[in-house]
Image (cartoon, rainbow, N blue to C red):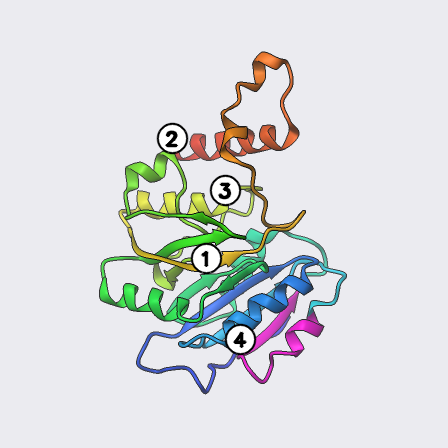
Amino acid sequence: MGGKVAAFVFQNMSHEPIAIVIPCFNHANELDGTLESLSRQTLLPAEVVVVDNGSDDHPETTVDKFRDKLPIKLDRFTERRGAPAARNYGASVTDSANLMFLDADVELAPDALLRLTEALESNPKASFAYSSFFWDFKKFPSQAWNADALKRLNYIHTSSLIRRKDFPSFDESLKKFQDWDVWLTMAEKGLSGIFVDEYLFRVKQRKAGISSWLPSFMHKIPWPIFGWMPKVIKRYQDAEKIIREKHKI
């Protein structure tokens, strides 16, 4: 794997530089939209690292399309190690003061990086800035920072802007809710986030991969009384239990 990405010459030096880390596993097509949205930002990132998590659909072809638009590099795992490991690796090979982790299905609004950066720089006590978002065409509203509310439900997406100095790293043992774990870990250290009350990105729904979603009513059905539970619900509940036990909530 290569060295660190050189700072992009078009970076606006009036703001702290941003490193974007994108784990990718067999989603070269979706990655194209993510990188296109990055290339159109009003505040360009200083570094972009795509970490190929053992793909066989040649994401390097997609990355090559953006080498004249973004300060981008591709690093590759020879075997699949999971998105948390890919994110941690990407963070380790960048230098910028701020970090943002994007999945390969996230497309940013043109002013997303600028709006999040402005919020973070206007609130020096905050360790990260986050927003609401769309899942396809469904709105997922977030809310103002509240550590107690966070213990009940994760309302902050992975795609938030984090001060590098406060980033605790992702728990690579977790299969789900890695972002919730990060925010809870930061809250336990007395760190907080700042909410930007806008819809600054869209997650593209797909059949399989990093992103999946079920309607909330599916989680409210008392499945045990039927003597059966869908596997996806069982996995969700088991993963949630791990987080709650880890953080004693």
The amino acid sitting under disc 3 is: Phe
Q: From mark 4 to mark 2, how far is it between C-alphas?
A: 38 Å
Please name which of the two marks, 2 or 3, marks the residue nearer to the observer. Answer: 3
Residue 11 versus residue 166 in the image, above or below: below
Residue 248 disc label = 2
Looking at the rendering, in which quadrant would you find the N terminus? bottom right
Q: Can you say which quadrant of the picture contains the C terminus?
A: top left
Question: What's the amino acid at mark 2?
Answer: Lys
Q: Is residue 157 above or below residue 91?
A: above
Nearer mark to the viewer, of 3 and 4: 3
Residue plotted at (39% across, 75% down): 17
Point out residue 74 in the picture as x, y percentages from the top left corner: 63, 71
Camera-side mark, 1 or 2: 1
Q: Which numbered marker is on residue 159?
A: 1
Residue 92: x percent and y percent? 50, 65
Which structural element holds mark 4?
A: loop
Q: How many marks?
A: 4
Q: Nearer the viewer, residue 3 or 142?
A: 142
Alpha carbon separation for disc pair 1 and 2: 25 Å
**Could you tell me how far apart the alpha carbons at marks 2 and 3 are, in whole angstroms?**
15 Å
- The amino acid pointed to by label 4 is Lys
Residue 190 among those drawn in magenta: no
Residue 177, numbered label: 3
Q: Position of residue 30 (x, y in %)?
A: 64, 62
